[in-house]
Amino acid sequence: MKKFGLLVFIFALSIGLTFSTNCGFNSFKNFGGIQGSGTPKTETRNVDDFTKIDASGAVNVEVAVGNSFAVEVQADDNLLANIKTEVSGDTLKIYSEDRISSKTRINVKISMPAIEGLEISGASSANVAGVKADSLELKASGASKIKINGEAQTLDADASGASSIDAEKLKVEDATVEANGASSATVSAINDLDLNASGASKISYVGEPKNIKQDSSGASSIKKK
């Protein structure tokens, strides 16, 4: 079982790295994409009316729940035009249409009145503060990371492909959490907690939930922190 778990971890990690190297944003040099200048610049984007975020490709996202909408993008000055921030329905999509290689970290700072969903992929990271939501959906894939704090009635979280979700500081009533492909998740719930870990993944929970349903397989583990 340990050997199987190790093989699953290696496979999942390779998938995560594939995501990170084939996405629009890329921090590796000399791969044929548009090379960054190395001179950072910040640009304000005029976008609003969204409750969800979908970010892909080695981007660092910082979200603060506030009174109004604001979006700032920081990257190499010659790459800003290639980094798209567009609203589709209720979702702010952050992506690049072209292969780019930024010499500085691509940062996107977002302020929004409320957040209901966050999806990141391709070796991205997200830090979310001050959440107050009825329901919240989190999804991290392709070696990505989410860290979040605040309050929500219900949480649906999914980590895959060597990704992690840290929701220990997010107080929720009920939570459903899945982790697979050498991923990890930490959660806190008061009432109902439904946990599923597979493929050499780990789920930890804090607190004393009233009802716990858990299922682990493939060298995975579920434990109280």
Image: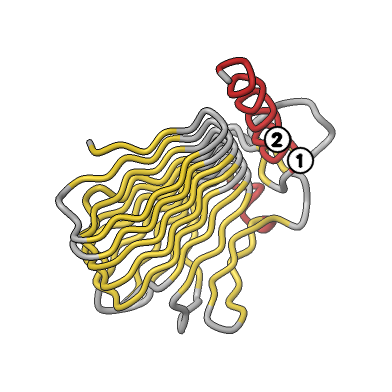
- Residue extending farthest to the top is 3
Nearer the camera: disc 1 or disc 2: 2
Q: Give left or right: position of 154 versus 199.
A: left
Q: Give left or right: position of 126 versus 35.
A: left
Residue indicated by mark 2: 15
Q: Distance between the residues labelled 1 and 2?
A: 11 Å
On the rendered image, what quadrant is the C terminus found in? top left
- Residue extending farthest to the right is 32
Where disc 2 sits, the SS reads helix
Q: Residue at x 55, y 33 (%)?
A: 182
Q: Where is residue 160 in the image (x, y as percent from the top left)?
A: 57, 45
Question: In the image, is residue 139 above or below residue 179?
Answer: below
Q: Which residue is drawn at 52% across and 81% down?
A: 90
Q: Give left or right: position of 58 versus 97.
A: left
Residue indicated by mark 1: 22
Amino acid type at circle 2 is Ile
Q: Where is residue 120 in the image (x, y as percent from the top left)?
A: 54, 53
For label 2, count other residues whose C-alpha is less than 10 Å away and answer few (under 14), some (14-19) or many (20+): many
Q: What is the quadrant of residue 22 in the picture?
A: top right
Q: Residue at x 28, y 64 (%)?
A: 192
Q: Give left or right: position of 205 versus 78.
A: left
Where disc 1 sits, the SS reads helix
Count of numbered badges drawn on the protein: 2
Q: Position of residue 214 (x, y in %)?
A: 39, 49
